[in-house]
Image (cartoon, rainbow, N blue to C red):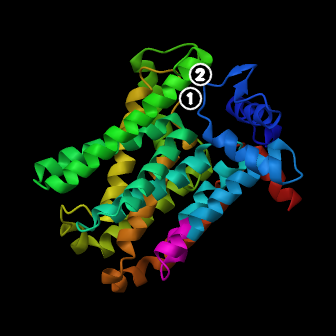
C-alpha cells in the first residue's frame, strides 16, 4: 500500500504516541491533540514501549492484537460456534492493515454490546461488577473514537424502549448508565478544552458541501459497502461479479429460512440488539455527514455497522434451534466470508491486480 497504510489520521495517532513516549504528553503538532481521543495512541504507545519496533509497526501489531482478542472473545462466548463468529473478522483484515483506530473501535464496540446484553438478559443480575464492566468497555469505545459516544445514545434509547414496555427496572438501569456515560464524555471534552482550548479538533475537511451534493456522494458509498466481496465502485467488473454472487447467496438463505423469518418476534435478543446498534450507528453517521466535514461514507466509516450486522446474522442463522437449516447454508456462507477476506485485500486498481497475478 502507498505509505505503508498511513493516512493523515495515521500520522496524528503515530505522532501523539511518540510524543507520549518522549514524555511530552498527548500532543499533535506541539499542542494537545483534541482532534482524536487518546485511546488508540495509548495502545500504540504500550506496544512501542514493549517491543523493539518502530511506532508504525507498533500500530500494525495493535490492530492484529485486537483481531486476535475478537476471535478469543468469540471463542469464550460461543465455544461450539467460535469458527462461525470468527469468519467476519477476516472482513476487518484490510482495515487492520492501515494505521487506523477503527479496528480497535469495532472490537471494543462489539464487546460492549455483548456486555450490555449479558446484563439485560438476567433480571436478577444486580452485581455491581457487571455494571462497572459495561461502563468501562462502553467508555473505552469513546476513548478510541469520538463516535463511541454512540453507546451512550444507544443505552439511553433502550431506556425509552423499556419504559414503553413498562420494565422499569431495566429502564432505570439503562437510563442511569446512559447518564453516567455522558458525564464521562463531558469530562473528557472539558479536559480537551482545558488542555487545548478546543472541545474537539473540529472538521477534518475545510468545506461542508450542500446536502444534495453530500447525498449524491453518500449513496455510492453505501452501495459499495453493500458489496462485501469488493471494496470499489460498481463500474469495476469484479464488483459486479461480487454483487451477483452476494445477491444469489442472500436469495438462497431467504429461501431456506423463509418460515423462520416470518416468525421473528419482537423480543430483544442478542442478534436484534446487535442489529439495532448497527442501525443506530449508521443513522447517526449518515446524519452527521450533512453537518460535519469528515470523510465520505465508505468501508472505513461503515464497517462498524457491517460487522455488527454480520455477527447478528450469523448468530441468528447458526442458532442451535435452527441447526437443521444452518447445515444447508453453512458451507456457502463460510466460503463467501473466507473469500471476502482475500478479495478485500486485492488492490482497487485493475492493472495492479493484473500485475499481482503475474507476479504470483
- Magenta segment includes 76: yes
Q: Are marks 1 and 2 in contact (CB under 8 Å)?
A: yes
Above/below status of 207 relative to 50: above
Q: Quadrant of the N terminus?
A: top right
User: CA gap, disc 1 to disc 2?
Assistant: 8 Å
Above/below status of 203 relative to 282: above
Q: Quadrant of the C terminus?
A: bottom right
User: For residue 9, which quarter of the picture?
Assistant: top right
Residue drawn 64% across the image and 49% down it? 95
Q: Nearer the viewer, mark 1 or mark 2?
A: 2
Looking at the image, residue 269 sits to the left or right of residue 224; the answer is left
Label annotation for residue 295 = 1
Q: Residue 141 placed where, x, y %?
A: 51, 45
Mark 2 lies on residue: 204
Residue drawn 74% across the image and 48% down it? 46
Q: What are the residue bounds of the magenta stretch?
A: 73-87
Amino acid at each position: 500500500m502507498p505509505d505503508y497504510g498511513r493516512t493523515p489520521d495515521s500520522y496524528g495517532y503515530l505522532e501523539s504516541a511518540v510524543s507520549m513516549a518522549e514524555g511530552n504528553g498527548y500532543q499533535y503538532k506541539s499542542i494537545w491533540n483534541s482532534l482524536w481521543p487518546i485511546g488508540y495512541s495509548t495502545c500504540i504507545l504500550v506496544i512501542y514501549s514493549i517491543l523493539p519496533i518502530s511506532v508504525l509497526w507498533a500500530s500494525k501489531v495493535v490492530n492484529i492484537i485486537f483481531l486476535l482478542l475478537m476471535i478469543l472473545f468469540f471463542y469464550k462466548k460461543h465455544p461450539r460456534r467460535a469458527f462461525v463468529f470468527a469468519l467476519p473478522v477476516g472482513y476487518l483484515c484490510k482495515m487492520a492493515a492501515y494505521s487506523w483506530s477503527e479496528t480497535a473501535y469495532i472490537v471494543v464496540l462489539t464487546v460492549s454490546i455483548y456486555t450490555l446484553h449479558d446484563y439485560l438478559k438476567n433480571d436478577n443480575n444486580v452485581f455491581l461488577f457487571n455494571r462497572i464492566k459495561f461502563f468501562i468497555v462502553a467508555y473505552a469505545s469513546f476513548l478510541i473514537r469520538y463516535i463511541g459516544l454512540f453507546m451512550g445514545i444507544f443505552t439511553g434509547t433502550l431506556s425509552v424502549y423499556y419504559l414503553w414496555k413498562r420494565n422499569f427496572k431495566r429502564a432505570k438501569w439503562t437510563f442511569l448508565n446512559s447518564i453516567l456515560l455522558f458525564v464521562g464524555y463531558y469530562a473528557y471534552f472539558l479536559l480537551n478544552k482545558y488542555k487545548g482550548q478546543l472541545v474537539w479538533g473540529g472538521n477534518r475537511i475545510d468545506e461542508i458541501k450542500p446536502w444534495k451534493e453530500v447525498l449524491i456522494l453518500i449513496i455510492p458509498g453505501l452501495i459499495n459497502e453493500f458489496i462485501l466481496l469488493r471494496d470499489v465502485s460498481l463500474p469495476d467488473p469484479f464488483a459486479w461479479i461480487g454483487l451477483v454472487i452476494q445477491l444469489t447467496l442472500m436469495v438462497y438463505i431467504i429461501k431456506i429460512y423463509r418460515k423462520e423469518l416470518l416468525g421473528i418476534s419482537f423480543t430483544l435478543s442478542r442478534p436484534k440488539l446487535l442489529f439495532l446498534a448497527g442501525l443506530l450507528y449508521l443513522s447517526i453517521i449518515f446524519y452527521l455527514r450533512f453537518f460535519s466535514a469528515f470523510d465520505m461514507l465508505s468501508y472505513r466509516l461503515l464497517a462498524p455497522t457491517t460487522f455488527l450486522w454480520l455477527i447478528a446474522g450469523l448468530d441468528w442463522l447458526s442458532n442451535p434451534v435452527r441447526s437443521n437449516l444452518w447445515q444447508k447454508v453453512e458451507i456457502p456462507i463460510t466460503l463467501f466470508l473466507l473469500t471476502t477476506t482475500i478479495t478485500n485485500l486485492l488492490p482497487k486498481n485493475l492493472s495492479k491486480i493484473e500485475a499481482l497475478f503475474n507476479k504470483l
